[in-house]
Image (cartoon, helix red, strand yellow):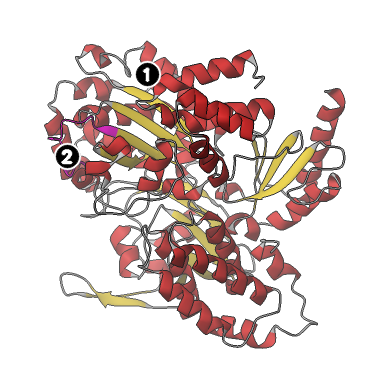
Amino acid sequence: MAIHPKEHRIVLKYADEPGYTPKIESYLEHGGYDTLKAAFSKKPEDIRDEVKKSQLRGRGGAGFPAGVKWSLVDRKSGKPIYLVCNADESEPGTFKDRQIIHKDPHQLIEGMMISAYANDCAKAFIYIREEMPHGARILDEAILEAKGKGFCGDNICGSEYSCDLVVHRGAAAYICGEETGLIESLEGKRANPRIKPPYFPAVLGLYQCPTIVNNVETLCDVKHIMEMGADEFAKIGRPNNTGTRIWCVSGGVQRPGYYEVGQITLGELVNDICGGPLPGRSIKAIIPGGSSMKILKAEDRYKGKNPDGSEYDWGLEDIPLDYDGIAAAGSMSGSGGMMVLDDTVSIPAALANLMAFYSHESCGQCTPCREGSLWLKKITTRMVHGEARPGDVDLMKSVADQIAGRTICAFGFAVAWPVQSYIAKFEDEFREYEESLSNPDTDRTSIKELACNHG
Amino acid sequence: MNLKPETIALIEAAIPKYPEKQSAVMPLLHAIQKDIGFLSNEAAEWVANKLGIEPINVLSVITFYPFFRQHKIGKRHIRVCRTLACAMAGASKVCDKMLSEFDAELNGVSPDGEVTVEFAECLASCGSAPVMLVDDELYENLDSAKATDICNKIKAEAKNA
């Protein structure tokens, strides 16, 4: 795949280079593990300071600053500290970690070993989803290679520091991407997320020990921050949105795929890099950061005030493609999984598709989420099947409002936000389903196929 | 429990990887399911005994995770992604094709015992939608014609087995 000139590849720099393989020889030929070797001449706290200074924010979803996350770790408990890489990549629309794991696994191992040394971790884990069996094998082989060369395991790079790295496979449960659910799963239990407080992973994580959970891309960025320096890293992108990000684009564009970019706009990604909508079609809406994020409507204006008092007034294409830009437009950049919905897509049917997903993936621990997600699946399904009842749209809003903020983990928001935002932006379309699509003569083949829940 | 020697080897290698034995529940269940095809109550008790925990602790894990199953499926496990990006790209028709080629019902075992076709939630390859997993292999950018080719390949492999 040719790399678009508007891309700025750091993490994926070699991933698609002809001849580049996941083997350690390829990685070493490209300067691999030099940064890890150099890290051992620094004090762990200096590495932590450098990462904090870079303003690196988590690439997994919430966008919490990684350096701050590290600074919250309880280093006085006397218990071992664990590092866990969240490779449970399951947020619909996201497929970036897959590229790193399959094509450049040693980069992740190097990033992890630097992070483990910086935080004096006793052991490190990679939690990878079950549906990436080759990824798990590639990582296992890469870890063996790294151990053979002294980049992982005992006395790393000849130092006093040792850290084992273990690959742990999930079993097809989305909730394992939630960090406390992941920890429960790693302990060999159901992945029911823990309540915070008191179970902040930085204090009471894996085996009730201080634990850091970072996304795959975040850990790779650590390697690049140490290689180029925090200041250089921060020059890519604007303050609070530093470094590159890998965006995954799917749906109604000419060139779907993964693209690593610096500071660009949403329009530059969707139109210039991805080639815009398919011929004869137009973009109706964009889900910017994975299916849990609020939808952005094509013809809307996105207005507000910047922190410095200046005003912005953007069309969809003008939105800066970073954490703060998408937040200013009322949504979130999430995991970078962007789904483009063109004018052929029925919004209620798309919602029915997602509600089947969320009701399947709710862990069942909290009643509002377990029951509410099922209600939302049932209502959206009957809507798609032409059996909507009067008041269904209001009922959906009411159910979503009762889930958001009333659950142990953020999954509740992930169920509610699509419902609340799709109805807010496309209420007419929902009302139309509610009112007129109960006509038995209506052809519902395509909307049923889009809902795709066979419910 | 009649496990293959390589399964026993996998199990013995997995347990010491973890600071606490219970963490090895999932790797053990993966190994046993791969060997036997599903996870019986006997398997749950065997794992519990191996790890020094109660059978209910193992059973609660088996029943929570969609990949762990308590029943037999076809020889090949076909999972068609159904989530939004794949659905927009025609996943429903791909799944219908897989089912009709094997005369199978969704989630059931085909009459010849060869396959079980299921819908899966997002397989994290939305840029090449629609996709499906056949056992460990991911197939991308599918349409009905490609689905037919994959079915023919599976049928040919079944004949040669």
Q: Is residue B14 magenta?
A: no
Q: Quarter holding the C terminus of chain A? A: bottom right
Three-letter code for the amino acid on which mark 2 is drawn: Asp
Which of pointers 1 and 2 lies earlier in the amino acid sequence?
Answer: 1
Mark 1: amino acid:
Leu
Q: Position of residue A123 (x, y in %)?
A: 30, 26
Find disc 1 in the rendering and name its residue.
A28
Q: Magenta part of the protein: which range? A: A70-82
To which quarter of the image does residue B112 belong?
top right
Q: Residue at x 18, y 21 (%)?
A: A40
Q: Main secondary structure of the magenta part?
A: loop
What is the quadrant of residue A69 in the picture? top left
Q: Which residue is mark 2?
A: A74
Look at the picture and state if A260 lies above or below A140: below
Q: Kindly report which numbered mark, 1 or 2, lies closer to the viewer in this rendering.
A: 2
- Looking at the image, how many numbered discs can be counted on the residues? 2
Asked whether, in this view, residue A172 is left or right of residue A176, the answer is: right
Q: Is residue A75 magenta?
A: yes
Image location of residue A451, percent across then percent down = 65, 65
Query: Which residue is drawn at the image coordinates 37% and 44% (left, top)?
Result: A8
Residue appearing at x 42%, y 49% in the figure: A192
Residue drawn at 64 percent across, 82 percent down: A433
Where A121 sits versus A49, above or below? above
Image height check: is A159 above or below A178? above
